[in-house]
Each structure stands twice: as C-alpha cells, then as structure tokens.
Image (spheres, rainbow, N blue to C red):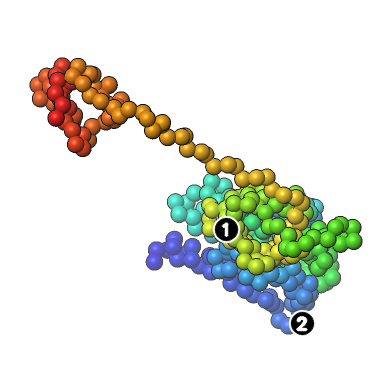
Amino acid sequence: MTPARLFHVSWAAAIALAFSVVSVAQSGSPLTDIQTKLSSQFKVTKIAADRSDIVTAGDVVQLHKPGLLMYSVASPLPPSNTYKNGKIGQGMGGFGRDLMIGMLTPGGTTPASTYPQRQFVPEEKCWVTGILVQKDGVLIQLYSDPYDDVRYYANLKIPFQNKKEVPSADAALQSVAEVLTVVPPDDQGAQPAVADSAASPAQEGPPPIPGQYLAPGGSHMLLLADGTFTKFVGGGQGHGQYAVDGDNLTLTFTSTGFSQKFKVQGGNLVDVNTQQAWARTGDAPQAPMPDIAPPPPPADTPPPTISVGQTMDQVTAGFGQPLRLAKVGTKTIFYYKDMKVTFTNGKVSNVE
C-alpha cells in the first residue's frame, strides 16, 4: 500500500474511531459528566454503514443558528463547521477538511465540484448521529432527511467559552442549546393536526391514495392514479413509482433506486423512519392522456404500382427504400424482398 493510500485509510479510520468513543476521560471527570448528560439528552440516530438511510431513528433536533453547511453523504468525510460569535461557519478548519476530502476523492477534485452541498437555515430539522466531548468543546455529527433524493451530513464543533477551563455540565449543555435543541416528542414528526371527525363528514371506506400531500415547512408531493409520484422538497423535486400493500406505501425514486416507506393512517401518510406526517390536502391532477396513434389509411386505398419511366423518388415514395442497391454503368438496381427494379439514367427501364 502506498504512503498516500495508507494516510487516506488511517485518516478515515481515525474519523470513524472518533465517533465510536463514548467517553474521553476517566470516570467522574468534568468531560465525562458532560458526555453523560449529553448522551442522556440526545438519543443518537443509527445510520447504515454506507450512510444511505436511517437504521434506528433517534431524536429530531432543530437548528437555531445560521451558516451550517452539509455535504452529500457520498462525500468520504463530512464538512467541518464551528459555532462562534452567534453563528456557524467553516473557517480554517473547514478549509483543512476540504483538503482532506479532496485527497480522498478519486482524481483529487474539490468537494464543491464533486459532491452536492446544502446550506441549512435556522428552524430546519435534522438528526444527531454522534456526540463526542473533547477537551476544548463538543463535536456533533448531523444527518439530514432526503432533499431531492439526497441526504446530507456534517460535523459541528461547539467550543467551550474558555479554552483553558472545562465548564460545568450544565454550562456546556446551555452552549449546545444555543445552537440546537431536541424537538419535543409530540412535534418530532412535525405532524399537522388532523381535523376532528365531528367537524367533517364521515368517510366511507378506505381513503383514496392518489392525491396531494403536504408536510410542515412547505414540502409536498403528488401521487397520481397511474402509480407515479413527484416529491417537492427544499426547492428540488424527485420522481418515481409508488406501491401500496395494505396500509404500507413505498416510494421508489427513479434516479437512485432509493426507497422511502410510509404508513397510511386516516388518509395521511406517516414516514416510517422520521414519523413525519404528510396530510392529504386534495385530489391529484389527472395523469396526462397517452398519445393516440393516427388512424390507419382507408381500406380502399389502391396498392402502389411501378411503371416504366418512373423516377427513383416515385418508386421509393410507393415502396420505401430498397433492401439493397447496385450500380452497373448507367443502370441502378433496387432490390426489394420479392422484386427487382432496374433504372437506366435514373428512370425505370425494367421490373422483375
């Protein structure tokens, strides 16, 4: 293994090891107290090894500060963000991390030109997939829902106010709470209220699946009667097919093959992983009508004929292009399936 490749592997292994650490100091130390309290306050989400989806959902958290930059999970490492002076930025730590991502990317290209990126704004929600208390602050790894069929992730460092002194656990938690907090359980899926049955007429039989569905924050999707869907999230959109099995509904995105599963509950769709509810707001527009083939020509149209003196264009207009063509001096021969037409000086001279 080359030194450069060994360095790449070692760095990636170090990143993975960093987020597998639960404690950074001996039992009873201030750092351990902070780690313990954070671990009890934030239920960490477990994701697949390839970062493509959520395996075990933890707590949903809400951002309170601007500037968080996330990269697509296709990036070998998440970008580095730091909270300072009331906002989140990348700084020199982010520049160094981009250099490392470029070294781990085939061809050594920059992350900006290789991986989709997204800037997150206050009040947006995401997941916590790792928390590590270090000697100078708290390092948190964040993971997003799909936006136009792309999930994003990032590291966020929240430094201690005094680099030479470890704060109390309560003070550290207060610093973290300035940046993000756990969404209350009754709002983790940001589920819209379902109208009281007394306020709306009773619905007979199961509700129709095709329709328009809306989630908090403006995301919406259309499920058409032909089994196709379009999902609009974060300014982008994804397309694919959906399938219904009892009260289970699965979206499969055409571009990536990624599947998203829902439960059908009282006319709404509830994401199995995030518990986010999509409220049915009405019927979807009708799928476009398929193109109608032109009618066949009238049955009494006479068959094409060939006569001596016709030009090549007249013959091909009636019989189409020949299967084979040969030229002998001033003669040109068209070979059809059951006919041979000879042209002399460009006009029919014989038909066999």
Residue 2 location, x and y as percent?
A: 39, 63
Q: Which residue is mark 2?
A: 28
Q: Is residue 65 visible?
A: no
Label 2 and label 1: CA atoms lie apart by 49 Å
Give the camera-side residue of 131 and 200.
Answer: 200
- Location of residue 165 with respect to 296 vertically, above or below: below
Image point (49%, 55%), residue name: 105
> Could you tell me how many numbered marks the image carries?
2
Image point (14%, 20%), residue name: 349
Give the camera-side residue of 311 and 91.
Answer: 311
Image point (48%, 64%), residue name: 7
Quadrant where the C terminus lies? top left
Q: In the drawing, does residue 334 fall left or right of residue 34?
A: left
Q: Is residue 11 visible?
A: yes
Residue sitting at the far left: 329
Residue sitting at the far front: 300
**Could you say whether the residue bearing mark 2 is in a helix, strand or loop?**
loop
Residue 38, located in which quarter of the rendered image?
Answer: bottom right
Residue 67 location, x and y as percent?
A: 72, 50
- Location of residue 94 with respect to 54 vertically, above or below: above
Q: Which residue is mark 1?
A: 252
- Location of residue 46 with respect to 61 vertically, above or below: below
Residue 329 location, x and y as percent?
A: 9, 21
The 10 Å Cα crowd at callout 2, few under 14, some 14 to 19, many 20 or more, is: few
Q: Given the image, on which type of amino acid does mark 1 rest?
A: Thr
The 10 Å Cα crowd at callout 1, few under 14, some 14 to 19, many 20 or more, is: many
Residue 126 location, x and y as percent?
A: 71, 60
